[in-house]
Amino acid sequence: MKWSSLTRKLPIKWKLTIWSSALLCILFVSYNILQYVVMEKWSINYEKQNSKHQLIELEAFFKEKSIRTPSELKSYAQYFATINEKNQLIRILDDKGKPVLIVSHSVPSSWVKPKRVVSLQYEITYHQQERLLILRSPMTTFAGTIEIVRNMEMFDDFQEAFFFVMVATGIGAIILSFLGGAIIAKQLLVNVQAMTNTVKRIKKNGLNERVPVNDTNDELAQLGKLFNDLMDDLEQSFLQQKQFVEDASHELRTPLTIIKGHLTMLNRWGKNDPNVLNKSLQSSLKEVERLNQLVHELLELSRAESESPDTTEWETVDVSMVIDQVIRNFENVYTDYKFRKIRSESLYINMVARHLEQVLVILLDNAVKYGQENQKEVHVSTYRMQNVAKIEVKDFGIGIPQEEIPYVFHRFYRVDKARSRKQGGNGLGLAIAKRLVEKYGGTISIESKEGQGTTVILTFPVVR
Ligand code: ADP
């Protein structure tokens, strides 16, 4: 419990370092243990084979010399001494188990107790620090036992040295892997640290800080880029919001200033002059109406911007029907205008009918607002091109200068501010229309010639 809470608190750098060192340590230790065991087995086998070889040689000698009794052995003592190897004892016992011949090279006979056997066997014993491999076998030429004792000192010395080397290299490897792990972890975490620092700076200084991204294109660099993109979007939207609030306040201020002017004037000296009173009240009422309209449009814009499309509300809208209805309403209000349907293919779009109506009202309203005295006509066309439903609203009004067209969709943008204001425009209509159309995967574009007229083209994905 304590350990896990400790590791959880550790920085990633240390976690990576410790894990890499621990893994390497385990790997190294297990490899060395395996190597040690294999070597041990191999060395014992090697010694066993040597002893066996010696035994076969001795027996062949006994056969050759036809030695039948232990007493005959004595005369060959010199020979045994020469064939005996270093660190080896050869001892022959009679049928009672008493040694009758002992030749030794650095292995005193007292180290091993004599023992009779009836079949070949190996034994490993220790005399103090010395490890001894004993081969015992019954003699074939006479009743007795032959013992060959080998001191494994050489292997043991070798293994001891090997063990020390192993431990030393193991410790070295762990230290190296610890350092390596620390360096790799540091390299990996440089970007993360940079990001942390950036977030800290953003908290302190604002949204314009960015993470320094190197050109490695690895996962961390990609994360850094993504983070910067996100910050760009966030900053952009933050600035837009700020701009919007500034613009909206500015727009609201104009009618308020006018109303205030009238009220101040009335308060000072207009109260008793019915003419001034009436004029001021009329102007103030007009401004209040404008304020009302502005607030209404702001609300519509905010809705169009924020609402994510709720597809459950969508219906299959018969475009002609909606257009007919909007035209009828306009004909009632603008009796001097002619609204004509030029091309009328039957079209169906998946959307909220109210939104299509709202867009058409904005477009027809503009067509009328920015019309010319002698050209009081508006044409509406609907047709289908491949899978796209197109709706065009064409007027023959004052038009929009080519360079201004891209801006008319911006909030509060008006080509001729004074004229627009006179017509009751706040520069929000096309902004609202654009957002509504785009909500349904549609587009809105404008073609216009100054002094000749404007065509607004809407496209929507058509219902199959
Ligand atoms: P507004 O409420 O001011 O009409 P819009 O967003 O609807 O705001 O339009 C933005 C500006 O684009 C208008 O102020 C006007 O200058 C210009 N505009 C829009 N429609 C037309 C049109 N049919 N003819 C000429 N100018 C237009």
Image: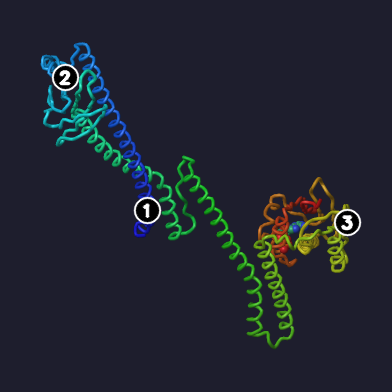
Q: Secondary structure at mark 3?
A: strand
Please indicate, yes or no, whether residue 80 appears anywhere in the rendered image.
yes
Badge nearest the viewer, 3 or 2: 2
- Residue 56 placed where, x, y %? 25, 18
Within the image, what quadrant is residue 290 found in?
A: bottom right
First reached walking from the N terminus: tag 1 or tag 3: 1
- CA gap between label 3 and label 2 equals 125 Å
Residue at 30% across, 38% down:
173
Check disc 1 and report the residue beneath it.
11
Tell me the amino acid under the disc marked 1. Answer: Pro
Residue 416 vertical position relative to residue 228 in the rendered view, above or below: below
- Residue 436 placed where, x, y %? 72, 59
Q: Secondary structure at mark 2?
A: loop
Q: Quadrant of the N terminus?
A: bottom left
Cβ of mark 2 under 8 A from ligand 1: no
- Taking the image in four quarters, ligand 1 sits in the one at bottom right
Check disc 3 and report the residue beneath it.
341
Query: Which is more toward the observer, 432 or 25?
Result: 25
